[in-house]
Image: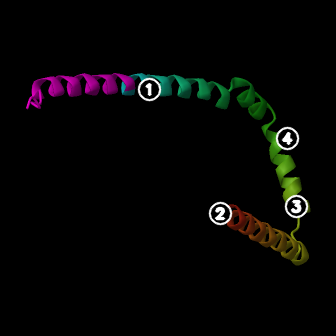
Amino acid sequence: MNNTIDYKRLYELSIIEKEELLNNISELKKNIQELEINLEKYKNTESKKKYYNKNKDKIIEYIKEYNKNYTRTPEKAKEYNKRAYEKRKNNKNEVAKESI
């Protein structure tokens, strides 16, 4: 019976595999950092900052006017709550049908 296990070879393979995994992880981390930098370009653009700084007073006035004019009556509140309840109920039924 020639079923000897070459432990030295298995150890070498495990070390090689571990190094490959570590290299892969480091590459993925670099990729994540690059993507985060690109995302920041889209999230924090200078044009948005300039617009809001330039029109800050107009935006604040608009919000104040909206809050003065907007009133939530009890009838509207009941209507919103009823729609939300029906939507949740429909979603539950759809999920239950899909699982069957």
- The residue under the point 9% across, 30% down is 4
Left or right, residue 14 beside residue 29: left
Mark nearest the camera among 2 and 3 is: 2
The quadrant in which residue 5 appears is top left
Q: Is residue 90 magenta?
A: no
Q: Are marks 2 and 4 in contact (CB under 8 Å)?
A: no
Under circle 3, the secondary element is helix
The answer to if 12 sits in the magenta stretch is yes
Q: Residues within 10 Å of mark 2 (few under 14, many from 20)?
A: few
Going from N to C along the chain, the mark reached first, 3 or 4, is 4
Query: What stretch of residues is rendered in magenta?
Result: 1-24
Residue 60 to residue 81: above or below: above
- From mark 1 to mark 3, how far is it between C-alphas? 51 Å
Coloration of the structure image: rainbow
First reached walking from the N terminus: tag 2 or tag 4: 4
Of residues 46 and 5, which is closer to you in this image?
A: 5
Amino acid, disc 3: Lys
Q: Which badge, 2 or 3, is on the more N-terminal residue?
A: 3
Residue visible at 59% across and 23% down in the picture: 38
Q: For mark 1, what is the residue?
A: 28
Residue wearing tag 3: 68
Which label belongs to residue 99?
2
Side of 39 where 50 appears, left or right? right
Mark 2 or 1, which is nearer the eye? 2
Q: Is residue 93 above or below residue 16?
A: below
Q: Main secondary structure of the magenta part?
A: helix
Amino acid type, mark 2: Ser
Residue 34 in the image: state x and y as whole percent: 52, 22
Q: Which mark is residue 49?
A: none
Residue labelled with disc 4 = 58
Residue lying at 85% horizontally and 76% vertically, measured from the top left: 78
